[in-house]
Image (spheres, rainbow, N blue to C red):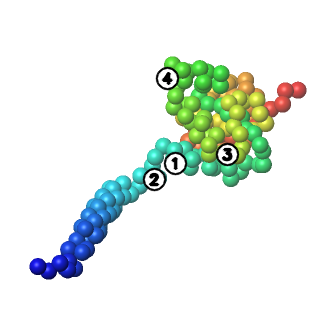
């Protein structure tokens, strides 16, 4: 009887593992490429990317400042209160995304700063409300995004 193993017997375990690994890598790459072809515009149409594109406009004209104020459709005091009852969470998410996009500038949830970001997704704020807050529009970017200057009370 021949005790010398043949080449196939010597390497059959390695060949099996290499073949299994090759099939697995092929299947996963095939799945990845199929998904990429199905969703070519996915990275440009997610809500975070859309919001970032809107807010990035402010960075282009923003003077160097460490802080900004923020106003939106509802009163600033109610922005965090409504979150507890799961109301207006979209407005709170917009606030957090604005902070994220404008970092390292800190965005305070208050109109009491020299420059204030107005983010109105539900339509423009009433002119009376803007006057009451002492805000003067500096630049209207459209789509409900406005940069305001806070008027000093004399």
Q: Nearer the viewer, residue 9 or 150?
A: 9
Instruction: Report how far apart the C-alphas of labels 2 and 4 lie in the structure.
Output: 28 Å
Residue for point 47% across, 53% down: 44
> Which residue matches tag 3?
103
Residue for point 56% across, 42% down: 143
Tag 3, which secondary structure? loop
Left or right: 132 in relation to 38: right
Residue 57 seen in render: yes
Q: Based on the displayed image, in which of its 4 quarters is residue 110 positioned?
A: top right
Tag 1, which secondary structure? helix
Q: Quadrant of the N terminus?
A: bottom left
Q: Residues within 10 Å of mark 4 (few under 14, many from 20)?
A: few
> Which residue matches tag 4?
86
Left or right: 51 in relation to 116: left
Q: Nearer the viewer, residue 1 or 24?
A: 1
Q: Residue furthest right?
A: 154
Left or right: 23 in relation to 113: left
Whichever of callouts 4 and 3 sits on the residue coming sooner in the sequence is 4
User: In the rendered view, would you say 36 is above or below 3?
Assistant: above
Whichever of callouts 3 and 2 sits on the residue coming sooner in the sequence is 2
Residue for point 51% across, 31% down: 90
Q: Pointers 3 and 2 in contact (CB under 8 A)?
A: no
Instruction: Report how far apart the C-alphas of labels 3 and 1 lie in the structure.
Output: 15 Å
Instruction: Report how far apart the C-alphas of labels 1 and 2 lie in the structure.
Output: 7 Å
Q: Based on the displayed image, in which of its 4 quarters is residue 29 positioned?
A: bottom left
> Which residue matches tag 2?
43
* Image position, residue 4 (x, y; %): 20, 80
Instruction: Report how far apart the C-alphas of labels 1 and 4 lie in the structure.
Output: 24 Å
> Which residue matches tag 1?
49
């Amino acid at each position: 009887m021949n005790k010398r193993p043949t080449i196939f017997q010597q390497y059959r375990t390695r060949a099996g593992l290499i073949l299994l690994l090759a099939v697995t890598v092929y299947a996963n790459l095939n799945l990845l490429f199929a998904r990429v072809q199905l969703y070519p515009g996915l990275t440009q149409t997610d809500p975070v990317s859309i919001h970032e594109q809107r807010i990035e406009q402010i960075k282009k004209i923003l003077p160097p400042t460490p802080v900004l104020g923020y106003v939106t459709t509802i009163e600033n005091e109610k922005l965090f209160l409504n979150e507890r009852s799961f109301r207006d969470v979209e407005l709170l998410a917009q606030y957090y995304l604005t902070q994220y996009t404008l970092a390292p500038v800190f965005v305070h949830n208050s109109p009491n700063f020299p420059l204030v970001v107005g983010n109105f997704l539900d339509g423009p704020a009433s002119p009376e409300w803007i006057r009451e807050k002492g805000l003067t529009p500096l630049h209207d970017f459209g789509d409900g995004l406005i940069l305001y200057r806070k008027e000093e009370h004399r």
